[in-house]
Image (cartoon, rainbow, N blue to C red):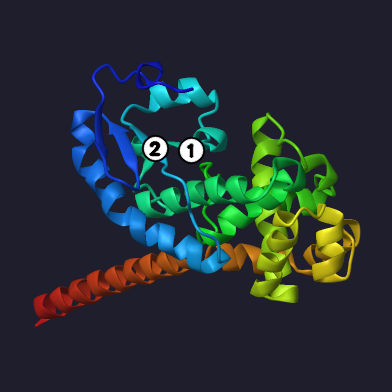
Amino acid sequence: MIVPQSLGMAQPEMMQNEEISVVFEKPLMSAAREVVRIYPAVKKELENLFGWRFNIRPQVILVKDNQNFNKMTRNDLFVAFAIADKNLIVIDYSRMNVRPFTLGVTLKHELCHLLLHHQIRNSNLPRWLNEGVCQWVSDGIGEIYPDKSRSALDAAVISGRMLSLQGLTDNFPENTASLMLAYEQSKSVVAYIERQYGKGTIIDILYHLRNGDSMETASMKSLSATVGQMEKEWLDQLERTPRWMIFLANNLYGILFFLAALLTFFGFIRLVKRKKAYRDWGDDE
């Protein structure tokens, strides 16, 4: 069990009610209040989506210092993690409100992990589906800091070095590049299932797993395809989609911002030239 002292929290404080408890350091008092405030709404969203009751009382630990948090994860990619069998969520608050992470989205992602754990046996829930679904419910945001300069998934598709879903059943790789790819693949597969079969199919798969079916059986019942067949269809679609289209979709706002800045720059140059021409005309007069 993680204790606050192991996270470098010398004098932790606690805020709690019947639904949740939050452990924090005094400078994070307002953040702790925010967690307590938004928890009921986040919990309700998950219950409405899955149709399951959230019958646990989670404990959330807010860590102020990034270095102390990294001592626990041993990987500076992570911004939060959940220990499901302890109903525990640990959040690196120093990285909250740094795009794309917010306290609400991160809390929702980690609570999803707790909910899936308490409804579905670990042996029935593949790691890739667990992570993919939790990213799906949190608007595509995961618990690791993304590399904004490149997409691990795009690079893997181009080079033909995708990770097999079978290899992502129990655990994710530890090295940074493969870990980021595992998260991106998980997100992409679940998004593919939603596009191809509909949102309800994802919930349907989870219901079958909750009732004790294996992933293969749940896939056949919900998709009329094995996991291997679904994986092949997903890969085929990825390979058929031009990567430049994916790049544009993922970086649309950045591209628009760059173009706007470029237009502003050229507009400024034009204005300077016009002023200079006007001064030169005045001198001639």
Residue on which disc 1 sits? 87
Q: Is mark 1 on a helix, strand or loop?
A: loop
Mark 1 burial class by Cα count in 10 Å: few <14, some 14-19, many 20+: some
Above or below — where is 187 with respect to 67? Answer: below
Amino acid type assigned to the residue bearing label 2 in the image: Gln
Q: Earlier in the sequence, mark 2 or mark 1?
A: 2
Q: Where is residue 132 in the image (x, y as percent from the top left)?
A: 65, 54
Q: Is residue 207 left or right of residue 49?
A: right
The answer for how far apart the CA atoms under marks 2 and 1 are is 6 Å
| Residue 75 in picture, x, y percent from top left | 55, 27
Cβ atoms at labels 2 and 1 below 8 Å apart:
yes
Q: Nearer the viewer, residue 49 or 243?
A: 49
Residue 244 position (above or below residue 80) = below
Dot 2: what SS? Answer: strand
Residue shown at 55% from the left, 38% from the top: 84
Q: In this view, does 223 lie to the left or right of 37?
A: right
The residue lying at 72 percent from left, 35 percent from top is: 171
**Residue 148 in sight here:** no
Residue matched to label 2: 59
The image shows residue 25 at horizontal and vertical percentages of 24, 28
Q: Position of residue 54 (x, y in %)?
A: 48, 54
Residue name at image x 65 percent, y 46 percent: 183
* Residue 192 visible in image: yes
Q: What residue type is labelled 1?
A: Asn
